[in-house]
Image: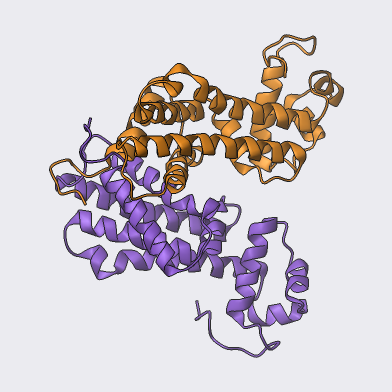
Chain colours: A purple, B orange
Amino acid sequence: MSDLSTPKRGRPGYDRAAILEIAVLAFNEHGYDATSMGVLASRLNLSKAAIYHHFSSKEELLQFALNHALGGLEELLLEPAATTGPAIDRLSHVLRGAVLMLADRLPYVTLLLRVRGNSPTERDALTRRKSFDRSVALLVSAARDAGSLRADIDPATVTRLLFGMVNSLTEWYQPTGPADAAHLADDVLALALNGLRTPSTSRE
Amino acid sequence: MSDLSTPKRGRPGYDRAAILEIAVLAFNEHGYDATSMGVLASRLNLSKAAIYHHFSSKEELLQFALNHALGGLEELLLEPAATTGPAIDRLSHVLRGAVLMLADRLPYVTLLLRVRGNSPTERDALTRRKSFDRSVALLVSAARDAGSLRADIDPATVTRLLFGMVNSLTEWYQPTGPADAAHLADDVLALALNGLRTPSTSRE
């Protein structure tokens, strides 16, 4: 897919990225199926033709939007800190990165999490999401095998609970800036790895 | 509201509870707004009049359904183990109980979590959900003040992350029985309170 920020001709003030951003907000607000190209055009105060100049279809808008969310997660897994070093550190890096990515691309991840597989585009997104989850579960398994993580919880369950926590950000997080997101990532890691109990109190 | 299991006249095989159960599954599958009483009637193979014999409106079905989810959470807060003893134990009881309740009433909680405040019934449910969250946040604060929980994470953030984890069950949990749910509740408590890191490795 081509770069979102590629400038193209069109009404001044709306490039591809700006149109996509507003489309994603509309999809989240009204639902993808209920948002027609006509609705988008009136939100943007553009003609439908002006939108079709940038995106060939509503489905293509969805593709770009889901790709922006999934691409962010997939790139995370390829970063050096996610591929080298002890598994526990790689897992921490991915978990922290996922929180920061969610905070940064909140409407895109919100849309991704609502996808139910109603079209080839949605099914493709679900497959990529499952593949990401599997990669994280493998990191959890590796950290467990290395003795860094408790062995009494199934890695698939751990992965689901961790991402249940992280994905819930789409329900309640109000972005106020990168410093805030970094603080939140610290909180998620502290809770996930060390737990809420103070070290001085007894551990099961 | 009257007891769901109260037997009433009607087509044999469908009491109020059975109609509600099937309505909730339909609401979750198609969305509340998109599910008409006609759709419900054909799912149940009943006339609309037969449904109206049990429930005065679609809104009343929603009310009963949301009440079944919220009532379960609210009763949890009133149990002796949630009201007496150290705050950390009360919090643990509520967290464990919430997992068991979700596993037991999964479609009802799924419906509750999708409510966005589009009607007085939905707004009332949101208010009750917020009130429940506030009660849990107060338990987190109390446990923190007692020195049982780490002091570096804001209690409201802790509550959101904990319920992000718990509520994610509606996305992935496949009920197989009470033993399985109890095991899952153990996992959630272990992760939340003690963290994933093995005790032997360093803690921040």
Q: Is residue A88 visible?
A: yes
Q: Is residue B152 left or right of residue B80?
A: left
Q: On the image, which quarter does residue B146 sit in?
A: top left
Q: Is residue A193 left or right of residue A124?
A: left
Q: Nearer the viewer, residue B175 or A13?
A: A13
| Residue A201: image location, x then y, percent | 23, 34
Residue visible at 63% across and 58% down? A28
Q: Is residue A101 above or below residue B152?
A: below
Q: On the image, which quarter does residue B48 sit in?
A: top right
Residue visible at 68% across and 88% down? A10
| Residue A183: image location, x then y, percent | 37, 60
Residue visible at 49% across and 39% down? B167
| Residue B129: image location, x then y, percent | 59, 37
| Residue A11: image location, x then y, percent | 71, 87
Q: Nearer the viewer, residue B12 or B198?
A: B198
Residue visible at 75% across and 43% down? B33
Q: Nearer the viewer, residue A12 or A47?
A: A12
Q: Is residue B29 above or below residue A89?
A: above
Q: Is residue A44 left or right of residue A112?
A: right
Q: How many marks?
A: 0
